[in-house]
Image: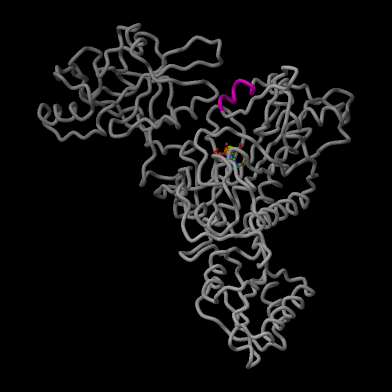
Amino acid sequence: MSKLFLRTLRDDPADAEVPSHKLLVRAGYVRRVAPGVYTWLPLGLRVLHAVENVVREEMDRIGAQEISLPALLPREPYEQTNRWHEYGDALFRLKDRKGSDMLLGPTHEELFALLVKGEYSSYKDLPVTLYQIQTKYRDEERPRAGILRGREFIMKDSYSFDLDDAGAKASYSAHREAYQAIFERLAVEYVIVKATSGAMGGSASEEFLAVSEVGEDTYVRSETGYAANVEAVITTAPESRPIEGLPAAVSHITGDTPTIATLVDWANGALDREVTAGDTLKNILVKTRLGDDAEWELLGVGVPGDREVDFKRLEASLEPAEVQLLEDADFAKYPFLVRGYIGPKALQANEVRYLVDPRVVDGTAWITGDDEQGKHVVDLVCGRDFTPDGTIEAAEVRDGDLAPDGTPLVSARGIEIGHIFQLGQKYTDAFEVDVLGENGKPVRLIQGSYGVGVSRLVAVIAEQHHDDKGLRWPKSVSPFDVHLVIANKDQTAIDGAESLAAELDSLGVSVLLDDRKASPGVKFKDAELVGIPTVVVVGRGYADGVVELRDRFAEGATELPVADAAEAIAGIVRD
Ligand code: ATP
Ligand code: MG
């Protein structure tokens, strides 16, 4: 440590909010260069390499082959899939000296598809899975928490190419298992969530979320182990009810009642029953279009009045169509839309597509807009007075809502650490990636895409494994196996520590030796901050033939006889 390029800091960096960010900076693992752009210092680089190696071993185990693509890429392939435009502001675009457009790769589906097209031509070559552990660039809107969300970051991305669906599924599940093995070895607590409901025929996609309060992804889980992204939650619809015998719908003058709250107030004064927001049907108007050149189309979305529309869920349900809220100008264009009083009647009369929450089943009666200023209708029955064009998952998900297995959901937060995705033929279609099939006819390949946030994982592990004193690395990624602290000024003790370090080294145990001329107190504090799980102290007891063993995960210390300390420590490290 007297030579190590390391300066620990006593104070948290001013720009750090989450613990992993504070500790990785204070303990001298990373240094900021610009927002979302970081330098890896010696300790940090060792952890990063350890994470990379775990990922590499598990990828190799499923037969994936490592290659390395450039980060600096030409525009054309991304133009061909429209991602040059679709990626929006997150794409780093640049020009070379000749004026040609280039980009810094945010992800490499296009390039891998082209590569396979160039090299392979026969079904006999397939299946194949290629991967790289490589630097990616995304101009994130909000780079955050140090290396957790960088603008330059390291990702493992792999891509599988298969001849048929069965093969594609096998590649997908091989990755799923590899990811489970990776995160297990890295001691990350995680859940696997369905990323999208697949309502619009989307292919299978799952995300691996590290459980963390500082995560930006909200998901829901139930005690039975069910977990899903909020976007992917499928509402449990009640049974439809008999319509016969229900009271007729009646229109009422409700006065100035443009909000659910004012409507409920009116109803509780005017009707001789107790009414809550859940008895009202709220109709939200949006516009959608499929593709930049298409016309915007109106869409009405009806949800129980006690729930907000969750725009992300709405977007996910309508994907790949684009969706926007109506603006004043739109309302002006359609006079039949009376803001605050919109009901199913006017929507259906004007052929506006009308989708409702799955809870709005046949036989349910609602208080809702009557399409005139100051008027609402009571007891409007679904299946009798209006017939929606279908259902949509757009209402917010709440704690206590039911999972598909009937258990209550609670919301939690996570950090996305991996994503596995069956792409189908999106990219192989774009580049016509075909090989000659067994019967002599061309076969279009099926692609899968799978990412792991390698640099992000360093922060995630730090986030899940620390205490108020510092980091606490799991053995699989610790920058060194043992932190050996010299806390005795006596030359024989110093020599003893150095020969113990050499002995450990020869046993294949990596050692960080604190040989600095600093007080034991300073050294112990740094050892706690740096977070190597096994700390050995050559201290006062050395004269009596013992060294002290401390475990970063436990209180107190034990003593080891110097004579067989190396063997004993090596045993602990390997355990
Ligand atoms: P996020 O939702 O967190 O922005 P993403 O869905 O855009 O991630 P993918 O395109 O699926 O990310 O990339 C694969 C993996 O790369 C992610 O699961 C994540 O672990 C990691 N990753 C993505 N963006 C970043 C980033 N800005 N910094 C660090 N790691 C990232
Ligand atoms: Mg993702």
Q: Quadrant of residue 299?
A: top left
Left or right: residue 537 compared with residue 323: right
Left or right: residue 462 compared with residue 158: left
- Above or below, 524 against 100 in this view is below
- Above or below, 267 against 230 in this view is above
**Magenta span includes 387:** no
Tell me the chief SS of the magenta region: helix
- Residue visible at 57% across and 32% down in the picture: 139
Q: Write the start and end of the magenta stretch as one range.
A: 83-89
How many marks the image carries: the answer is 0
- Depth check, front residue: 408 or 101: 101
Residue 468: x, y in percent? Answer: 46, 64
Left or right: residue 302 compared with residue 422: left
- Above or below, 138 against 254 in this view is below
| The C terminus sits in image quarter | bottom right
- Residue visible at 52% across and 55% down in the picture: 463
| The N terminus sits in image quarter | bottom right
Residue 151: x, y in percent? Answer: 59, 37
- Residue visible at 62% across and 60% down in the picture: 6
- Above or below, 32 against 120 in this view is below
Q: Quadrant of ligand 2?
A: top right
Residue 248: x, y in percent? Answer: 21, 20
- Depth check, front residue: 466 or 268: 466
- Residue visible at 83% across and 36% down in the picture: 126
**Magenta span includes 88:** yes
Give the color scheme: rainbow, by chain, secondary structure or one colour: one colour
- Depth check, front residue: 1 or 378: 1
Residue at the far bottom: name it: 544
- Depth check, front residue: 312 or 500: 500
Residue 534: x, y in percent? Answer: 62, 72
Q: Quadrant of residue 421?
A: top right
